[in-house]
Amino acid sequence: MIRAEAITKLFHDKKRGEIVAVNKLSFACKSGMILGVLGLNGAGKTTALRILATLLKPSSGTAFINNIDVVKYPDKAKAQIGFISSDTGLYRRLTPREIVGYFGELYGISRQESAIRLKEYSEILGMDDFLDTKVDKLSTGQKQKVSITRTMLHNPPILIMDEPTAGLDIVASAHIVELIRRAKSQNRAIIFSTHIMHEAQRLCDEILIIHNGMATRNGTIEKLRMETGIEDLDQIFLDSVGDLD
């Protein structure tokens, strides 16, 4: 479903010169699988995920979404993807119901079907109490739930989630984790970036650890334990980024 092949992204800074944000990064994620992406701030996680979501063009290499080349055919690839980040980017003066209805029209979904899907997501995420409240009155967690509903409304087979639970309380995080589990049961391919190790350990089938734009570890948690001789994922992560004494 998702395959990155030696993707590299260079940025140019007037003071620091050429910056390699992602360096020949390769990995894959199959249907019905959750790939957890871990890394320090600035490791290149968000850049890599934005390349997969066709929001950035790689300097070299490419990625495939359902065998669609994201560099050659970005619009076709984008139609297969739901991209979710902690930056919700919602219209502040609209209500969640209005936002979902609007995006349903953009996706070519009938009003009736949009309403059915909104009801479904509202039940899973606990949104009933604020569906008709303007976005600028909502909490961070409520906004994130609206953003996720908007992104998943067209039932994309691939989800790319960049720290979707960042800054959320335990209840909001639990709702989103449940939605991720549900998406996996529907045979979707899911890439899930997080700083919360217990989320990664509970949710993910495989782990990709990125450091300085490169993959330092990639595989099931059991495989990483065998490679490192370390049981705890937190300690595996620290070992993989060179911060374990």
Image (cartoon, helix red, strand yellow):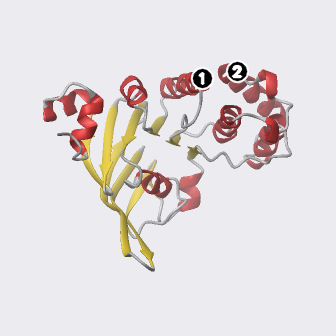
Residue in view at x 70 percent, y 32 percent: 142
Residue 108: which quarter of the image? top right
Would residue 110 be found to the left or right of residue 146 on screen?
A: right
Q: Which residue is mark 1?
A: 175
- Secondary element at tag 1: helix
Could one spot residue 220 in this view of the protein? no
Q: Up-down: is 235 above or below 209?
A: above
- Choose the circle earlier in sequence order: 1 or 2: 2
Which amino acid, by three-letter code, is at mark 1?
A: His
Residue 40 position in % (x across, y down): 37, 47
In the foreground, 159 or 216: 216
Residue 76: which quarter of the image? bottom right
**How packed is label 2: few (under 14 Cα within 10 Å), some, or many (20 or more)?**
some
Circles 1 and 2, Cβ within 8 Å, touching? The answer is yes
Q: Which residue is mark 2?
A: 126
Would residue 2 be found to the left or right of residue 231 on screen?
A: right
Residue in view at x 38 percent, y 42 percent: 37
- Where, quadrant-wise, is the C terminus in this rendering? top left
Which amino acid, by three-letter code, is at mark 2?
A: Gly
Q: In the rendering, which numbered label is found on residue 204?
A: none
**How packed is label 1: few (under 14 Cα within 10 Å), some, or many (20 or more)?**
some
Q: Up-down: is 21 above or below 181?
A: below
